[in-house]
Amino acid sequence: MKTLKQMDRGALSDALDHAGQRTTPQREMVFSVLLDERNHPTADEVYTRTKSRMPTISMATVYNCLEALVTCGLVKQVNIEREPTRYCPNLSPHAHFHCRETGRVYDVPVPEGMMKDLVKVLPGNYSADSVELVFRGHLEKGKTK
Amino acid sequence: MKTLKQMDRGALSDALDHAGQRTTPQREMVFSVLLDERNHPTADEVYTRTKSRMPTISMATVYNCLEALVTCGLVKQVNIEREPTRYCPNLSPHAHFHCRETGRVYDVPVPEGMMKDLVKVLPGNYSADSVELVFRGHLEKGKTK
DNA sequence: AACATAGTTTAGAATTATTCTAAATCAAAT
DNA sequence: ATTTGATTTAGAATAATTCTAAACTATGTT
Ligand SMILES: [Mn+2]
Ligand SMILES: [Mn+2]
Ligand SMILES: [Zn+2]
Ligand SMILES: [Zn+2]
């Protein structure tokens, strides 16, 4: 897909607006790149993909746009070990699976309410506003999804 | 504590030996520093602490020793966001809590078997050999643990 | 329309945690 | 004693990200 669906365009404008930021062609394009192929790309990969559609964009702008998207809540950063940060536009609660063989990162849907239940292991004086669950291992041959 | 307990010294030698690596004064000292104050120090903090007891040690050696300890399974790396890697000698299954205010990282004990149960959310073609659970938030005043 | 203002984009420099390199040191084995 | 291979060390190199400062763009005001 080459462009942002009307629904996503609206969500983007709303979210940016709500965070006091402008909607720009670069931000739209970066967001579109993230929605288009949801394989947790690094900034570098986002740069390559975006540049192919908007050849004048710079790496600095890609970082700026990604930061804007994270700040306004449309995208989450995913950090695994010391590897470059990856970006995930999946807003529903989910875990991540990191395949040691391919290096790829997959979304893992979790049962309704599980993420919220996990914070119950915290002692009373801890209050968590985010929970991250990451698995590492390998994917059996056959299904690559 | 200034030196390694006999128990820990034995565990260290065994683990290094099993991984085909030698027991050295530097490795003993770094391990002792990690056991001594279990607050998930960064390599830099380990360097500072170790240097105060063994002034000739170098940063490169600290990284080398930490890597040896990780390789032989006595220490785990803890990565949180893009911050410097931290080192944790707690071998029992546990989660981590990262306080946004102080930046400190705490161990959170989890119910027996919970970490193992978590992998049940994975589809059949995924096989995980490690599970990481990280909370982020803040610690109520009163207990600093 | 002209202007002022503030946000954004951009190229390139700076930062920084970590890894690499190559030489010196050390410790076991012969 | 000599050889061998592992370890330590200082410093250089790497690489993801952030910073800087100038150009550009959009928006609101006279
Ligand atoms: Mn990987
Ligand atoms: Mn922090
Ligand atoms: Zn994801
Ligand atoms: Zn820990």
Image (cartoon, coloured by chain):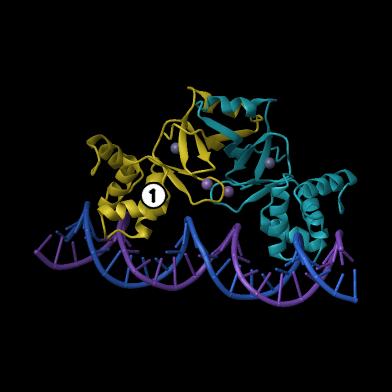
Chain colours: A yellow, B cyan, C purple, D blue
Compared across the picture, whether A7 is left or right of A67 comes to left
Q: At label 1, which amino acid type do we have?
A: Leu
Q: Is B122 located above or below residue A35 in the figure?
A: above
**Count of marks overlaid on the render:** 1
Q: Residue at x 59, y 39 (%)?
A: B138
Compared across the picture, whether B131 is left or right of A74 comes to right
Extreme top residue here? A112
User: Which residue is denoted by mark 1 in the rendering?
Assistant: A66
Q: Nearer the viewer, residue A70 or C17?
A: C17
Q: Secondary structure at mark 1?
A: helix
Q: Nearer the viewer, residue A59 or B121?
A: B121
Q: Is B85 located above or below residue A18 in the figure?
A: below
Give residue D21's quadrant in the image.
bottom left
Task: Name the spot of residue B43 as percent of width and height, x first.
Answer: 67, 56
Query: Visible in this render: residue A116?
Result: yes
Within 10 angstroms of label 1, few (less than 14), some, or many (20 or more) residues? many
Q: Chain of mark 1?
A: A
Query: Visible in this render: residue A132?
Result: no
Quadrant of the rendering where the C terminus of chain B is positioned: top right
Task: Name the spot of residue B68 as percent of width and height, x first.
Answer: 72, 53
Q: Is C6 located above or below residue B37 in the figure?
A: below
Q: Nearer the viewer, residue B123 or B38?
A: B123
